[in-house]
Every structure is written in structure tokens, then in C-alpha cells.
Image (cartoon, rainbow, N blue to C red):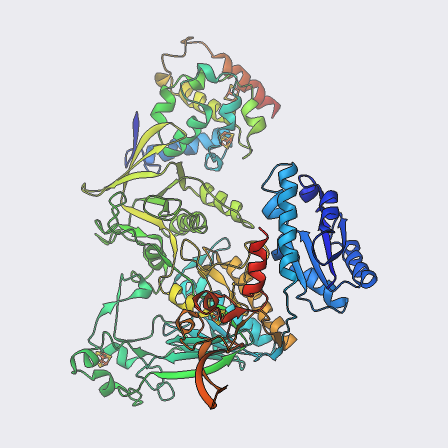
Amino acid sequence: MRFSLNSETSGTKKENAAILDELEMITEEKFSNCFQCAKCSAGCPASEYMDLYPHQVILMAKLGLFERIFESKSIWICTCCFACGSRCPQDLDPARIMEGFRLIALRKTESRPEVYPFKGEIPRQAYVAHYRKNFK
Amino acid sequence: MRIGVFICWCGSNIAGTVDVESLSEKAKFLPDVYYSEDVKYMCSEIGQESIKKAIKEQKLERVVIGSCSPRMHEETFQEVLKDSGLNPYYVEIANLREQCSWVHDEGEETTQKAFELVEKAVAKIRFAKPLTTETLPVTKRALVVGGGIAGIQSALDIAEAGYEVDLVENTPSLGGRMAQLDKTFPTLDCSACILTPKMVEASSHPNIRLLTYAEIEDVSGFVGNFDIKIRQKAKSIDHDKCTGCGDCTEKCPAKIDNEFEEDKEIRKAVYTPFPQAVPNKPVIDRDNCRYFQKGKCKVCQKVCPAEAVDYEQEDEIIEERYGGVILATGFDQLKPEGWEEFGYGAHPDVITSLELERMFNSSGPTGGKVVCPSTGREPKRVVFIQCVGSRDKNKGNAYCSKVCCLYTAKHTLLLKEKLPDTESFVFYIDIRTAGKSYEEFYERARSTGAKYLKGHVSKVETDGKELLVRSYDNSIGEQIEVEADLVVLASAIKAKGTTEGLAQMFGATGDKDGFLSEAHPKLKPVETQTAGVFLAGACQGPNDIPDTVGQAGAAASKIIGLFNRGEVESLPTTAEVDASICSGCLKCEPVCPVGAISSEQIEEKVPGGVVTRQVAGVNNALCRGCGACTAACRNGAMNLKGYTHRELLAEVDNL
Ligand code: SF4
Ligand code: SF4
Ligand code: SF4
Ligand code: SF4
């Protein structure tokens, strides 16, 4: 496979910049800090069911490849176990980033992908996220 | 003759594989050996005391020590003999560690080899003659070659300690590579702002004589007293009269690629290299001047209000004696011309990092604007490629250039500042940030938006509208292509081509990459193999500014130490001619690398009178004891003191 970075995917493009802004607001995470050590993916218990590993999701977000993230199963498969965030040497929380993508996807229901099986219902990750928000 | 043999265990280093006790017993039966002993650590104070005690009690006259390499402790043991009232050169070392115990397994054969090594050392010391050294006064004047930050700093340090320094630079100005930089990592201070004050200080320091536009012509002598000829190239401008007004430069019709701007701008034939140059007065580059090349022009002379232009000026040879020398000749950056993969030279928008550096600078060719050279427009997407020609055994150099990771991070930050909407992508193999605050600086570059992609670039396609950079992203595990407006190559730091010849004059050696070799990679980092010649900065290997300044200070302190001592000991192991055998063929003369041999006339009694005859003579002050002449002499008349034919043959006979 090959992917391309050009004026379409460019982070300076208006839509992309808006998505990144929204993500950073929702997640309070600074994506750019990630240096791709892949420790998050190394310890992720759900990774075998994912099509994109957590570190790949983060890199793609940095590169503005949002389509591929919204299309991926991974953001729905993440169990919010927070194993990744407890280990990340850059003190990032990939789980929150996964959650950010889910939230954006849910807000725009039309972009909710096929892989999410419970159409019309609240996904269970949303509950988890809800509790966590209250705890924070 | 009474010889004592001392066998060192070196902890388990030797005793682990060699039976040191039986070895010591057996050594007692060697000719002239009156005493032998084995000691756990011979180099320790206890070990040294036991040698002294034995010398005294057993009335030993010569000593053989079976221990580590003489490189490590020969001097230690020579001191022991000196303290005991013996000639320090009456000690011979059998290298039982590097040449035996470390390279063989435990066993009888190993112990036998150790014995034979001791046996041959005993054989040699029986023929040893006492050697003496002279103390010679040191000339307390230093020479620093190279006027970049390394040279400037070492000259200042020596001058501040109260000694006189000549600072020789072959371009018309001090400053070196650092002067070309816009900002410096990891603090982003402006390079000129921190460098110019040092340049000015060096040029006005009462203890520093600045010789710009000058080259080393010839070197002779040795530590303490190097006799050096310096060629002061004709500047063709009388700097006493010149006011630095710049009228000549403005009117000069000759246009030449400006090396200070990485050839991206032109300069004139009469020029000062850059606005903050020190001295800030022009020289005429005769190779490119119309008058010197074609005989017609003299425009500069006509316009010069101070009548400073002097076409008749000639190169001048300055002869001076120096006690010590620092080589600080800097580096070059590789230009990957003709390397198909990166498109450098094939497309104007593929540039080197130093070319970008000049673009950032407000006095640079673009007045501080970052643009695509092909269109003059601002780039929207800039791709940085690291390790171009570094860590590349195929076309470049095997080593890491050390500074590129950090300056690339710096470039992405400067770019963000100048063009906030422009994206930076950095392709890398590894990011190496070994240095104080360097990792934090890299982090700052990332968090400011530079996108780091792990993977080297296979090809920059130059035929489309935009440049297309092809690579493979190791994180995502897919090929990647980036459309770029500007591609910046972090091209390797390489040794200067001119360094080798210069180093040879000083007896300094180069490493496999052409950088100058330090005497020991850990313990003698600024020394060379030639006593009194030191290294500072990137002539020794790729280096950043903080380390360069550190080296410069270290090299300066070595010189200051030498001058404070005020005297040096001459080499005892020089060549010696036995005039009675020498036939005067002088085959030895051309093989001597330092020109220590010349012909001498001696008078000899022969039946029926006295004749005068030619023989070889060795200048002990120049001879470095390499021994080349001893091998060249067909009569065996030439001997190296401490390594005479007699001594060496005695060793060979016993092997
Ligand atoms: S552990 Fe942290 S720094 Fe490492 S890849 Fe994952 S998010 Fe990035
Ligand atoms: S929180 Fe999600 S991404 Fe992180 S380790 Fe758990 S399942 Fe994997
Ligand atoms: S004489 Fe030479 S340096 Fe002077 S103006 Fe003419 S070309 Fe330039
Ligand atoms: S040993 Fe001989 S060849 Fe070597 S430096 Fe001395 S005189 Fe010259």
C-alpha cells in the first residue's frame, strides 16, 4: 500500500485544521508530542482486532489522513482500558484520542461506519467515556 | 651484570591464563638474572615499592618487567628506576597481557610463550646502553591555524593566559562556518550576535596577531620550538590606508559565485566575505580579477578615495618560532551533486541545509525570505531529508555527522516562525539528540508542528510540477509519497580536502574519513601523535558548537601548560650513525620524513696521512626516532638508540 501527502491531505487545509482543532479540544492531548515509539501499540490488549494500531492512528491524525481513521475499526474496538496512556513516555493518552475520534464520528452520525454494529444505540465506549469525564 | 625480573599478575588479567609463579621461578635461570618475583599489581604503589626494594637489596642493575603493554606503564617503571638511581632506560617490558594472556587460553603453551617473551626481554636488556635526554627551552608563542569558532576560542584562551598567539586564517575574514549560520541550536540565539563579539575581541586582543588571507607554507622543528613559515597572500589593498568604505567593491565589474552564500549569490573580485567580516577591509581575489587575469580594468584603483589599492603587493613569507600549535581547520559540507536519488543539481528546489541557512539570514541572498529558488515563491510544503551522505556506506560516509538532527529541528522551527502556514516533513533514520537540552529541542520542533516520518527517502522525482518525495513510513508500514515545493538535504559534514596536506606538515595523521586523529579516543582527545600539536573543532570529526568550544579550551589549556612548564625533554631514542662503518652513500637521507639527516665531513687517519670523507649526520633535535633510516642503511651504520641492531637481534635470536 502507499499513501500520499499533498495539498489535499495537508494539515494547513481548512477542514483538516478544523478537525485537528476539534480533536485537541475534545481530548486535551497534544498529538504532535508523539514520537512513534509504538509502546502504546505494543501493550494494547485489543490490538489483534484492530486494523490500525494506536500509534498509527496518532500518526495519521498528525498527517491529516482523517478519512482512514474514520473508516477504521480500531476506534470502535478500543476498550478504553488505558493501558496505553499509563505507559506512554510522552505522557499522551491514546485512549482519549480514540475517544475523540468516536465522539466526532458520533456527532456526525452519517459518518458512523459500518463496523459499528449497534446502529441507533449508544455505543458502550461512550458510557465508559462518560464515566471518565465525570471522574476527571 | 645483575638483572631482576618482575612478573605482574595484573589481577586475573595475566594470572588467569599464565602460571605466573612458575614463570617467575623459571626466569631465575636466565643469563644474568639474579632475582625474580611475581606481584599482584606491579603498577600499584606496593608493586613499585617491591621493585625499588629489590633493586636496593639485590643490587640490581637492570630490570625486566612482564606486564601489560609498554604503552600503559613504561613511564611508570622508568620513574621507579630513576628513583632508585638507575638509568631509566634500563627497564625492558615483556608484554604478557596484550600479546599473551588476553589472546590465548589457559595452558602450558601460554605460559611457555610468556616465558619466551620474558626471555627475549632479558636478552635485549643485556645489550642496553644508558640513554639521556636534554631539557630544551620552550618558545612561549602559540600558533592557531583556522579562524572559525574553534580557532578564535583557543587563541583567546591562550592570549588571556598571557601568552602571544598568531591566529592564521586562509580566507579574508575570521568567522568560519559559524559565521554562515543564522541561528544556533538549542537556544536559537543569532549566530552572528554571539560570534561577532568574539571575532572583534580576537582581532583587538594585544596578545593576538591576526593573519587573515594567509597559509602555512612550511613546518620544521618539534615541540617547544616549531619553525614555521607562513605565506601572507597579497591582499592587493593596503589595509593601513583602506577605510573600508566599500566603493571598490561596488564598482568592480567582475562577478563570481559567492562561496559564503554557498554559491547562491555573486560577489565581486575585490570583496569582504560578509558584512560583519573581521577585518572589515577588502582583498582582491587575483584569480578572478580582470586586471590580474586580462591586464585591463583598474576600476577599483580609480574609485578608491584612500588610494589603498596596490596591484604591486607581493606575497610575504613570515617566519616565526612557536612552542605549540593548534589545528582548527574546520569542515566542509558534502554537495550530493550527481546522486540521482535526491535530485540535487537536477532541480533548483532541492537545496542543502547550508543553502537554507543562508536563506534564513537577513543578509543572505534572499534577504531572509525562504523561497523556492525556481519561482521565488514561498513553499507550502517543505521536505527535510536527514542522513544525506551520512551513515551511508554506499555513496557517502559511514559515520554520523552529529549535528544534522538538531539543525533540521532548528530549521523546522525557524520555518514555522517565518511561514506559519507552511508544513514541514522530516524523513529520518534515527533522531540523535545526545546533548544537554537537545531532546527537549527536538520535542519543541515536533510540538511546533514538524511532521517526523521514520524512513529514508528512496527518490525525489524532479520531473513533475512539484517535487515528489518517495519513502516508506515505518510506523504505518506503507510506502509514502509527499508532494513538496522545496526539499532540504541535511548533507554530511566531511573533512576538508585541504586538511590532509596541512596535517602532514605538522606530522598529524588523518583517520579513514580524512578527519585528524586524536592521540587517544578517550584519554587524549585534543592531542595528536606529534607532541605540541593539538586539535580543536570539526577538523577532528563532526562537532557542534558547544563541543567545539570545549575542545578549543582543552587544546588551549594544553598549550598553556606547556608554556608554564617552560621546557621540554628531548627524545632519547634518536638515530645515531657509526661513522666508522658509514660509507657516506646517504641512502638514509631521502627516507627520513623530517629531514634530520644531512651529510657531514669527517677526517680519518689512513696509512700515510689524513683524509676527509663524507658520512651521514643526524640532527638529534629533529629526529623523531621512526627508525626508517636504520632499515635503509646497507652497512648497518645507522642505529636507533634503545633499539640498536644488537638489541633487536638478541631478541630475535631468543624467539
Ligand atoms: S506510546 Fe505515546 S509516544 Fe509512543 S507511540 Fe504511543 S502515543 Fe506515541
Ligand atoms: S485504551 Fe484502547 S488503544 Fe489504549 S491500550 Fe486499551 S484498548 Fe488499546
Ligand atoms: S581591477 Fe580587479 S578587483 Fe579592481 S575593479 Fe577591476 S576586476 Fe575588480
Ligand atoms: S630515525 Fe632516522 S629517519 Fe627517522 S626521524 Fe630519525 S633520522 Fe629521520
Counting from the top left corner in percent of width and height, residue B651 is at 58, 56
Q: Is residue B62 left or right of residue A111?
A: right
| Residue B140 vertical position relative to residue A10 in the rendered view, above or below | below
From the viewer's perspective, tell me whether residue B387 is left or right of residue A36.
left
Tell me what residue is drawn at x 69 percent, y 39 percent: B16
Q: Which residue: 34% across, 17% down?
A: A110
Q: Is residue B482 visible?
A: yes
On the image, the x and y values in percent for residue B110 come to 63, 40
Q: What residue lies at 70% left-to-right and 69% top-to-bottom?
A: B87
- The relative height of residue B447 versus residue B164 in the rendered view (above or below) is above
Image x and y of residue B573, in percent: 57, 69
- Decide: is B187 above or below B266: above
Front-most of B460 and A71? B460
Nearest the eye: B618 or B472: B618
Q: Give whichever of B28, B294 is nearer the camera.
A: B28
Image x and y of residue B5, in percent? 72, 54
